[in-house]
Amino acid sequence: MSNLPVLVLNSGSSSIKFAMYEAGNGKREKLFDGAVDGIGTAMGTFWIKDAAGKKLVDQTPPLPSRAEAFALVAAALNSADFPKPAAIGHRVVCAGPTIRENQLVTPQFIDELESYAELAPLHTPIAVYILRESLRLFPGVPNFSCLDTYFHRHFTEEVYTLPLPPEYAAMGVRRYGFHGLSYESIVHELEPKVPERLVVAHLGNGASISAIKNGVGVDTSMSMTPFSGIISGSRTGDMDPGVLIYILRKLAAGKPGTLEAADELESIIGKKAGLLGVSGLSNDMRSLREAIAAGNKDARLAVTLFTRLITKYVASYFAELGGMDMLVFTGGIGENDGDTRAEVCAGLSALGIKLDVAKNKSRGMATISAADSKVVVRVIPPAEDLMIVNHVVRLLH
């Protein structure tokens, strides 16, 4: 295909990000990207930039709901100012136990996805809405779902099984893993020399760690939902389930029904916990580092919990993989916060990991391990959009 504009859509709880790529004849050239942010507010932002960074659209519209937000995006992309997409790729966080492959989006697919919305409650409801609207507002354009769980599809039974009676597995209760498009992009970047034993730490507002052997995901910190694993910006990470039962009982005592109490508990563990909950200040690592420098003990405790859990997971994957050839940091914190990388690696010194202090100050793609480190340590930015484009082109063919 000589001309193949592919639109990538990535919807979140309060934003819709998008990018258009020219993908014909093997190209992967970004034409423009944009975002609408602040959904649910009186004044949001809507911008589109070309490949050189020049703003083509720059607005501050009211965004009371996702309907207004996506209508802005669709109207702009259907105008004569931009090329019409030949195909659209959507990031889908989790489609449940019955959908494991990236595929063409149909109304039946969307219905199935919606039936498992509780597995990713912050992401799936808006993704369902965007998928339905995309089919309506871009008639005749094929839409494809690209799953964050797809990279983890090779998990063995002992990895994906949770210790519950089998009737719960029949409900879809199992380990899925997330951030798969990010992990896939790291493997893609390292090809053709992918290390045999690779651990990747995707550290951002959502954070997880994955063990990868010969390019295949074999284990990951997130389980059935993105709430699990290491703590992140506003999520608890792994917790004693008895804590949740205790809190749920306390909440239920003052609620008219169980569902209301469960909804409040979900809000606590997903939006009020993690770095934000422990620090009482922010879910942004930059703000927390500034607070630490000013002597804020709660900010220090939050960040220490974060780096300690990362260290524990990385060390456990060293054991699971039978060693480690490379550790990669990615995601917003992984790419930009040298202090987090240094604190994690200091906790892994018993494994022979040693950083080059000067190189660790760099941002963006870099090798930051010392010459005598037994494990290569790298920083590689994720490229989820590129992976989505690759899947769309493959599925089109």
Image (tube, grey):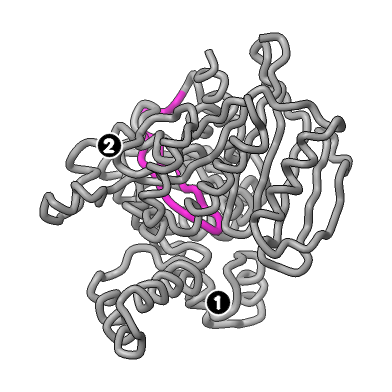
List x then y, in percent, for residue 251: 34, 84
Q: Please state which amino acid type lies under the numbered disc 1.
A: Ala
Instruction: Give the amino acid type for the residue marked by disc 2 in the picture.
Output: Phe
Query: Left or right: where does residue 286 sit relative to residue 182?
Result: right
Which of 315/152 is in front?
A: 152
Write the start and end of the magenta stretch as one range.
Answer: 194-212
Query: Between 298 and 295, which is closer to the camera in this rendering?
Result: 298
> Could you say which disc has been placed on residue 299 in the image?
1
Q: Residue at x 45, y 41 (%)?
A: 110
Asked which secondary structure carries label 1, the reply is helix
Identify the residue at image location x=67%, y=19%.
23
Q: Which residue is mark 2?
A: 155
Where's residue 200, x and y in %? 45, 42
For marks 2 and 1, give the one nearer the viewer: 2
**SS at circle 2:** loop
Q: Which mark is residue 281?
A: none
- Say if 60 sits above or below 264 in the image: above
Q: Looking at the image, is mark 2 or mark 1 earlier in the sequence?
A: 2
- Residue displayed at 34% across by 73% down: 259
Classify residue 136 as left or right of residue 268. right
